[in-house]
Image (spheres, grey):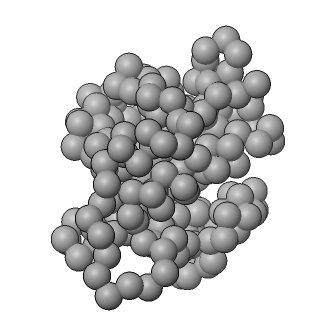
């Protein structure tokens, strides 16, 4: 049985190990070399109050996957949009962990007040496309030859999900812990 909970600072090394595996072994992650724990800790400190990090934990309390949201762009008008990503440890692919993680992430982001979610998917990646489309994401763009990795060019498609009805004036974004508190989501 896999538990989905809010990540905490001490989870970052396990999260980073999964991300770095993807960076070293796949084109799904565009990092060209392993990222540092310090860089992830700095990002965490800057973003985790408004952008959730969730982890999937197995029966042995081992982190087997994670999902997170990050700011879409730096300009203030983008505050109601977030970019989402999900990674699962390679030994646990195909067991529904990505779906379980997104099944908690999307409602959290909606409860926080985000309006639009974006996901970049290196092409081809049918498993990721199916996962995103199962949550209602629709392909919005394809950027050709935007990433050079493993001695070849890679295209990246962007999928978007509109979480809220169109409104004249959105409400302020709610903190992650406040939004998650009423959602059966462990505090981490």
Q: Residue at x 53, y 50 (%)?
A: 105
Of 53 and 28, which appears nearest the observer? 53
Q: Residue at x 68, y 43 (%)?
A: 100
Q: Is residue 136 left or right of residue 179?
A: right
**Image: 17 above or below 181:** above
* Residue farthest right in this picture: 94
**Residue 74: percent from left, percent from top:** 22, 65
Of 81 and 33, which appears nearest the observer? 81
* Residue farthest left in this picture: 76
Q: Is residue 57 left or right of residue 12?
A: right
Considering the image in quadrants, where does the C terminus appear? top left
**Residue 149: percent from left, percent from top:** 52, 55
**Residue 107: percent from left, percent from top:** 54, 55
**Image: 18 above or below 22:** above
**Residue 27: percent from left, percent from top:** 58, 52
The answer to which image quadrant residue 177 occupies is: top left
Considering the image in quadrants, where does the N terminus appear? top right
């Amino acid at each position: 049985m896999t538990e989905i909970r809010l990540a905490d600072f001490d989870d970052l090394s396990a999260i980073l190990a999964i991300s770095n595996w993807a960076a070293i072994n796949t084109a799904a992650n565009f990092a060209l070399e392993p990222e540092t724990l310090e860089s992830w800790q700095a990002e965490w400190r800057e973003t985790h109050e408004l952008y959730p990090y969730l982890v999937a934990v197995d029966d042995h309390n081992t982190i087997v996957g994670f999902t997170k949201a990050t700011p879409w762009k730096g300009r203030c008008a983008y505050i109601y949009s977030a970019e989402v990503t999900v990674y699962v440890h390679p030994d646990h692919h195909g067991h529904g962990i990505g779906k379980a993680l997104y099944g908690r992430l999307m409602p959290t982001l909606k409860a926080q007040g985000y309006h639009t979610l974006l996901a970049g998917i290196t092409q081809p990646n049918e498993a990721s496309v199916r996962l995103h489309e199962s949550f209602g994401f629709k392909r919005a763009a394809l950027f050709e030859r935007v990433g050079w990795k493993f001695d070849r060019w890679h295209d990246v498609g962007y999928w978007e999900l509109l979480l809220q009805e169109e409104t004249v004036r959105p409400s302020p974004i709610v903190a992650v812990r406040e939004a998650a508190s009423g959602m059966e989501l462990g505090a981490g």
